[in-house]
Image: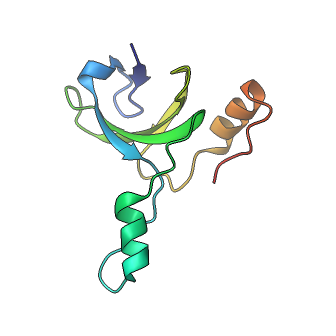
Amino acid sequence: MLTLECPYCGVKAEETELQPGGEAHLKRYGPGSTDEEFDGYMFSRKNPKGVHFERWRHAYGCGKWFLAARCTATLEVFGTYPAQTSEPPAELQAKIKAKRPNWEGYK
């Protein structure tokens, strides 16, 4: 079972206490965007095999949204961080790179 630590309340929660929110760090398009931009935001997702950045909500805890880095093939969790972060923290990226030398980095 997937276990993530909420960066706000510090609780290590199993996935049954959490609500997934899809891919993290997406650029959201709203009024004034082109059809292609809005279509890309609504329907295009990376869904890679390997390291992936996701949104999660601590639904049965503090209720806050946070972000997590994990491997979609092995379910290994590299870390979690606050939802207001615009890109994965450098120390988290270094941790991933140390475990996965062939990882090409964020983006």
- Foreground: 74 or 89? 74
Left or right for 18, reference 46:
left
- Foreground: 62 or 69? 69
In the rendered picture of this protein, how many numbered marks are placed on residues? Answer: 0
- Foreground: 97 or 7? 97
Q: Quadrant of the C terminus?
A: bottom right
Across and down, in percent, residue 15 comes to 32, 21
Query: In this orientation, does residue 28 appear?
Result: no
Q: Residue at x 67, y 44 (%)?
A: 90
Query: In this orientation, does residue 25 appear?
Result: yes
Q: How is the image coloured?
A: rainbow
Residue at the extreme bottom? 32
Left or right for 2, reference 61:
right
Residue 39: name its quadrant: bottom left
Residue at the extreme left? 60
Tell me if residue 87 comes above or below residue 82 in the rendering: below
Residue at the extreme right? 101
Across and down, in percent, residue 3 comes to 41, 18
Q: Residue at x 54, y 39 (%)?
A: 52
Residue 36: name its quadrant: bottom left
Q: Residue at x 43, y 47 (%)?
A: 23
Tell me if residue 6 comes above or below residue 24 in the rendering: above
Q: Quadrant of the N terminus?
A: top left
Q: Residue at x 69, y 30 (%)?
A: 95
Residue 99: name its quadrant: top right
Across and down, in percent, residue 77 comes to 53, 24
Left or right for 75, reference 34:
right
